[in-house]
Image: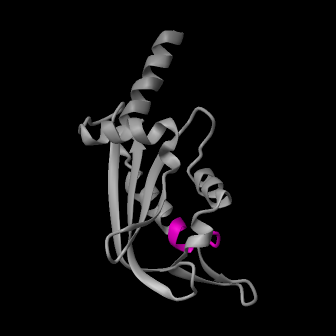
Amino acid sequence: MIIVSLTIIMISNAYFNLKIDVFEQDTILFYNRLFFDRNLVKSDPISDRIYPGIFVLKKLSTEDFSNKLADTIYYGKDNEHLAAEINLVSKEKHVVSFFNPGEQKGFQEWILLAESWIPGPGGASLKRFIQPNILYIGENSRPKLGFLNTSIVMRND
């Protein structure tokens, strides 16, 4: 009886995981967190205003930001759910800043699964965003033009 019950639960879990796809919503949520994160974009503490899409390199390169962004995609010790790779590229196509919270085991393994097109449980899904016309503030306070290249990968389990 217990074996039959567990089998039914496992089959129904696999069925719902295949039919209900939350990958699109999870990637959009993560991507929006990038654009509206006070720890990443330009912000004014006096007026409590943030300027989405204007990235500050000083904030990008800090260990604090790396930890906070890694925490936004952390779903538990044994439940890595989503991994991302983020490149901020200048107009001249030079990588200005690079962040890969997926240096954890997840990103490297899942990107291979996503590129191999394995459907269903055991596979992974990949979405790439390229956002043009991003402003970033470097050493001097003048904004420069660039673009943000983001790869987000999520397991299909």
Q: Where is residue 35 in the image (x, y as percent from the top left)?
A: 51, 72
Model colouring: one colour
Report which quarter residue 96 is drawn in.
bottom left
Q: Which of these two is toward me, 37 or 93? A: 93
| Span highlighted in magenta in the image | 33-39
Looking at the rendered structure, the number of numbered marks drawn on it comes to 0
The residue sitting at 71% across, 85% down in the picture is 48
87 in magenta: no
Q: Is residue 9 visible?
A: yes
Q: Position of residue 53 (x, y in %)?
A: 48, 79
Q: Is residue 16 visible?
A: no
Q: Is residue 76 left or right of residue 84?
A: right
Q: Quadrant of the C terminus?
A: top left
Query: Does 78 sit above or below residue 5?
Result: below
The residue sitting at 62% across, 39% down in the picture is 76
Query: Does 52 sit above or below residue 123?
Result: below
Q: Where is residue 4 in the image (x, y as percent from the top left)?
A: 46, 13
Q: Is residue 64 left or right of residue 99?
A: right
Q: Which of these two is toward me, 79 or 61? A: 61
The residue sitting at 59% across, 57% down in the picture is 69
Q: Which of these two is toward me, 75 or 66? A: 66
38 in magenta: yes
Q: Position of residue 24 (x, y in %)?
A: 38, 57
The furthest residue to the left = 117
The furthest residue to the front = 139
The residue sitting at 65% across, 56% down in the picture is 63
